[in-house]
């Protein structure tokens, strides 16, 4: 299971970095829930990614650390291309079901006014 969880998280970051918003349908479960955003489903992810990329077209997420246990991954990332200062850090925890991300919790040093 740990490889499946790691692969799901890495697919998500790769799609985000490539601005591949349509990939959300194959990465997230139909009933996916984002606790930080309060959104449900891949369409919510697509809208969120699109808003983010509209504001920060050069944004790239770099995985700094990933710990996988059971059906969950904890990931620390840095977000480049959003500030002239030091790259903000994010900490996200994913729950994976059947190879797709089903639930997400997160903390971020990013501004939330986008």
Image (cartoon, rainbow, N blue to C red):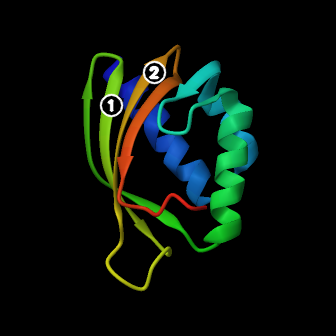
Which residue: 59% across, 74% down?
A: 58
The x and y percentages for residue 90 are: 35, 53
Q: Quadrant of residue 113?
A: bottom right
9 shown above or below 70: below
> Taking 93 as reference, is 16 above or below it?
below
Quadrant of the snapshot with the N terminus: top left
Question: In the structure shown, which secondary structural element does the residue marked by tag 1 occupy?
Answer: strand
Q: Is residue 57 visible?
A: yes
User: Quick check: 51 above or below 55?
Assistant: above
Nearer the N terminus, badge 2 or badge 1? Answer: 1
Task: Determine which quarter of the picture holds residue 39.
Answer: top right
Q: Are marks 2 and 1 in contact (CB under 8 Å)?
A: yes
Instruction: In the displayed orientation, state which residue is furthest to the front.
Output: 113
Q: Residue at x 45, y 21 (%)?
A: 96
**Marking on residue 96:** 2
Q: Quadrant of residue 83?
A: bottom left
The answer to whether residue 14 is above or below residue 67 is below
The location of residue 57, given as percent across then percent down, is: 65, 72
Q: Residues within 10 Å of mark 2 (few under 14, many from 20)?
A: many
Q: Residue at x 72, y 46 (%)?
A: 47
Q: In the image, 99: left or right of 43?
A: left
Give left or right: position of 57 versus 65: right
Q: Which residue is tagged 1? A: 73
Asked whether residue 19 is in view, the answer is no
């Amino acid at each position: 299971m740990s490889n499946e969880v790691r692969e799901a998280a890495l697919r998500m970051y790769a799609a985000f970095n490539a601005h591949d918003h349509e990939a959300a349908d194959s990465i997230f479960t139909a009933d996916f829930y984002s606790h930080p955003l309060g959104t449900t489903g891949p369409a919510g992810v697509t809208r969120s990614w699109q808003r983010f990329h509209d504001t920060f077209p050069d944004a790239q997420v770099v995985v700094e650390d990933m710990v996988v246990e059971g059906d969950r991954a904890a990931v620390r990332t840095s977000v480049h291309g959003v500030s002239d200062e030091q790259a903000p850090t994010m900490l996200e925890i994913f729950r994976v079901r059947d190879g797709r991300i089903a639930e997400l919790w997160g903390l971020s040093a990013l501004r939330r006014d986008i």
